[in-house]
Image (tube, grey):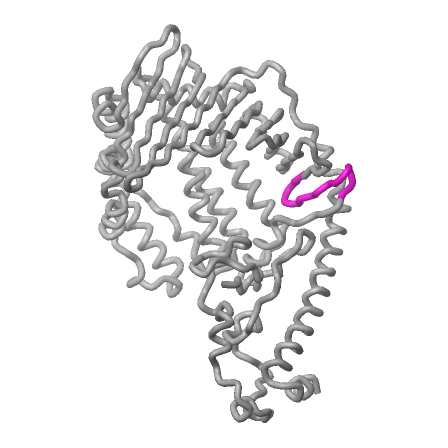
Amino acid sequence: MFCSNCGKQNEDNALFCADCGSRLTASSPVPETEILSEDYSESTYAYTPEANYNPEPETTLLSTPEAPFAPPAFSVNEMPPAPKKMKKGLKLALILIPVAIVLAALIGVGSFAAVKLNSPLVKIGKGFSKLVTSGQAYNYNVSVDNGYDDIKVSADVKFDLKSKRIDLVNGKSSLEGEKVNFEAFLNANDDELGFHLDVDDSDLEMYVYNGYQMIYEDGELTDADSLYQYYAEVFGIEESEINDIIFGFISIAFDAANGDKTTEEAEKEFMEIIKKYSDSDIDFDKMNLKVDQKLVKQTEKELQKCLTDKKWLEENLGLTVTKEGKTTVYSFNIPVEKAVKALFDILEPLLKDSYDKGVEIAKDSIGEEIDSDDIPTFDETVNEFFDTLEGADEDISITVDIEMAKSEITAINVKVKEKSGISSDTVKVKVEISKSEDFSAPKTDAYKKDIDEAKELIKKLEEERKNYYDNYYDDYYNDYSDDYYGDDYTDYYIS
């Protein structure tokens, strides 16, 4: 089956294109055997312009069912054809809104670590908080064993919330003997996001800076791409606006994590960004969930009571605590189905209130864009979710060990075992954490030195791609028409 978006050939039973990710549909070209089985008699396909010529076909060339083949896949220097430009607004808003909610939720999670209780989860929460709030650089040494590959990754990472920076240096990874070096940085104060990668024993290296990807060979820029172009055309906005959206969200998240903004202020500013870059008919002023604050406090109190109760943790999260010298090991042998149901029992009143209000707001603010019959009730959604969880404890087991020395996390070990019939697969992840004493932030000048040259190269490649496809489709259509309808059809069409 060929993808109607990029032309890549996929497996016949594939649902999505392995190359561009587009959904595959029945409009892809039919197998050649079906074409050959049709009647190609002269009487059937004799040329008559009135019967055969349609100057405005309902389907595109690539989606024509009778087409015997599809265009070839793209080479390294050929970018896929630009998607159809969609209306700026609703789709962008529907994507940004959940992103904003998730970011706001993540900001609120950190507050639990500040609870002054002597509980295993509180100690663990404070340990994770220290990794991102202390201003200290830490080395993370990660190894992954899935039974087939032995993957190793290490890097020094420093979170500086006050300066709104995250830096990753000395990154090294190894898979089947191939070694890759990498570094990255995020600077929300100056709206900069960069990534650098190079492979040992290779002349190739890659830089990414604010949405521009640059490929170098022997130190010379040989290829470039705009990572934002596709999304800018889909959402009908400028590439620079995507950058503004990304750093707007990141900056607000940093401010909230620093305590410079409350969660409510952060949520309000998230919505302002969404409103600014969406010209849909959504009434954003109505999009205020107005969650029952008494219910919030009641849920928070109940959640803290359970998560700080060692007996509750033992029964529902499989917690055991052991001492190994100066190290304390917190082990969670998690019964998935039981753990989720226990947490849901606590959160259900708040989740139901938020869900029902969210549905009403969506109906009121988006209007005809949402069909009420297509929106499941809260109970229907919950039942469907728990149906998917049924038997989870028999199919999968999850064990998490967190090692702490004093107040610092020193290691995390995760083991996931998935059972399928008589066979089983096990994935083991080990993370060793230690202070990095030799840390130096990435030099950002190397990332932006060739941005202007990269932009020019992108324009050149775009023009080459356009010319290629113009010529390709002309040749394809002429050859296809001649073979299918006869030479006279092409002459008539051109004239």
Q: Residue at x 66, y 78 (%)?
A: 478
Most common SS among magenta residues: strand
Magenta highlight range: 207-221
Location of residue 289 with respect to 72 vertically, above or below: above
Can I make out residue 182 in this image?
no
Quadrant of image for the C terminus: bottom right
Q: Is residue 191 left or right of residue 379?
A: right
Q: How many marks?
A: 0
Nearer to me, 433 or 85: 433
Q: Residue at x 55, y 25 (%)?
A: 154
16 within the magenta span: no
Quadrant hosting residue 364: bottom left
Quadrant hosting residue 408: top left
Q: Is residue 409 left or right of residue 383?
A: right
218 within the magenta span: yes
Nearer to me, 252 or 51: 51
Residue 374 position within the rendered picture, expressed as x and y whole percent measured from the top left: 31, 61
Residue found farthest to the top: 325
Residue 413 position within the rendered picture, expressed as x and y whole percent measured from the top left: 40, 23
Nearer to me, 343 or 350: 343
Nearer to me, 204 or 111: 204
Residue 103 position within the rendered picture, expressed as x and y whole percent measured from the top left: 45, 39
